[in-house]
C-alpha cells in the first residue's frame, strides 16, 4: 500500500515491409498503489470494526435474559471492497433469537436464500457484494443467555470482516458476564422476578 510500481516496456512493430523498417519505442509506466479497502470503526479510522452488546462493551446478564448485539464498520480505504463477508460465531451459552437479524435497520431472513444474511448453527453471516470507500454498515441481532453457563463466566464475542481484496480483521470484543446472582423471587408477591443486581431489593415483612 502507498508504494510506487515502475514498469519498463518496449514495443516493436511486426510490419516487416515498412519504409523505415520495424519501428520500436520504449516507455515507462508508473503506478502509485493506494491503501485499498480498509475496515474500521465507523467513527475512528484508527480502531477496528466495533461490536457492542446493548450499546456497551460489557453487559452483566442473567440466565434467560435477551440482549442486542451490534456490529458496525466503515470502509476507510480508497478502493471499493468486493464480496465482503461479515461472520459472527456466537459462543456456547448464547443462542441466536430467530428472525432478529437486521442490516442497516432492514430485516434479513435466517435462511440461505436471496438476501444478504443467514444464520446456521448459531453462526451469523452477512454478504455484501460491494462496499464503497466511506460506506458504513450496521448489523444487529438479538440473542439469549442460556442457563448452561456457570455464574461469573464472561462470554467474549468478536465478529470478523473480510473481502476478496482485503485481509480479515476482527472487531472489538463484546462480553456478556453471567450474573452470579441471577433472579430472586420475592415471597408473598406472586412470581414476579426481581433483578438481584439492583442496588436494593425489598422483601415483604412477616405478619
Image (cartoon, rainbow, N blue to C red):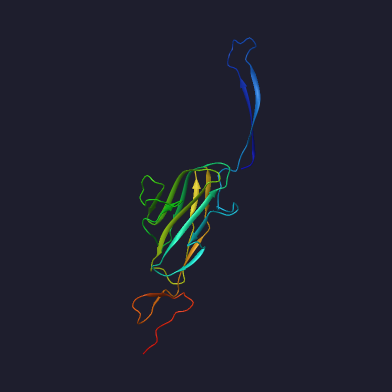
What residue do we see at 50% from left, 48% from top? 162
Q: Nearer the viewer, residue 28 or 113?
A: 113
Say whether residue 134 is left or right of residue 8.
left
x, y (%) of residue 201? 44, 79
Q: Quadrant of residue 26?
A: top right
Say whether residue 74 is left or right of residue 180.
right
Q: Quadrant of residue 122?
A: bottom left
x, y (%) of residue 197? 46, 74
x, y (%) of residue 125? 43, 51
Q: Nearer the viewer, residue 171 or 141?
A: 141
x, y (%) of residue 138? 48, 52
User: In the image, is residue 56 above or below residue 167?
Assistant: below
Q: Nearer the viewer, residue 152 or 58?
A: 58
What residue do we see at 54% from left, 49% from top? 74
Q: Which quadrant of the figure contains the N terminus?
A: top right
Residue sitting farthest toward the left: 190
Say whether residue 61 is left or right of residue 189.
right
What residue do we see at 64% from left, 40% from top? 3
Q: Nearer the viewer, residue 93 or 117?
A: 117
User: In the image, is residue 99 above or below residue 82?
Assistant: below
Q: Which quadrant of the figure contains the C terminus?
A: bottom left
What residue do we see at 41% from left, 59% from top? 142
Amino acid at each position: 500500500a502507498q508504494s510506487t510500481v515502475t514498469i519498463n516496456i518496449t514495443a516493436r512493430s511486426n510490419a516487416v515491409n515498412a519504409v523505415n523498417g520495424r519501428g520500436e519505442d520504449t516507455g515507462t509506466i508508473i503506478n502509485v498503489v493506494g491503501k485499498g479497502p480498509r475496515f474500521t470503526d465507523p467513527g475512528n479510522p484508527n480502531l477496528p470494526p466495533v461490536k457492542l452488546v446493548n450499546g456497551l462493551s460489557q453487559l452483566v446478564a442473567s440466565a434467560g435474559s435477551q440482549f442486542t448485539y451490534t456490529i458496525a464498520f466503515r470502509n476507510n480505504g480508497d478502493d471499493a471492497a468486493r464480496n465482503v463477508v461479515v461472520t459472527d460465531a456466537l459462543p456456547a451459552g448464547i443462542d441466536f433469537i430467530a428472525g432478529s437479524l437486521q442490516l442497516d435497520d432492514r430485516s434479513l431472513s435466517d435462511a440461505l436464500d436471496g438476501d444478504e444474511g443467514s444464520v446456521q448453527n448459531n453462526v451469523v453471516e452477512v454478504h455484501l457484494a460491494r462496499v464503497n470507500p466511506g460506506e458504513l454498515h450496521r448489523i444487529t441481532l438479538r440473542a439469549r443467555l442460556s442457563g448452561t453457563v456457570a455464574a461469573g463466566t464472561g462470554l467474549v464475542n468478536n465478529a470478523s470482516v473480510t473481502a476478496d481484496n482485503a485481509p480479515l480483521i476482527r472487531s472489538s470484543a463484546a462480553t456478556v458476564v453471567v450474573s452470579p446472582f441471577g433472579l430472586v423471587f420475592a415471597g408473598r408477591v406472586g412470581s414476579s422476578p426481581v433483578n438481584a443486581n439492583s442496588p436494593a431489593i425489598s422483601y415483604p415483612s412477616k405478619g
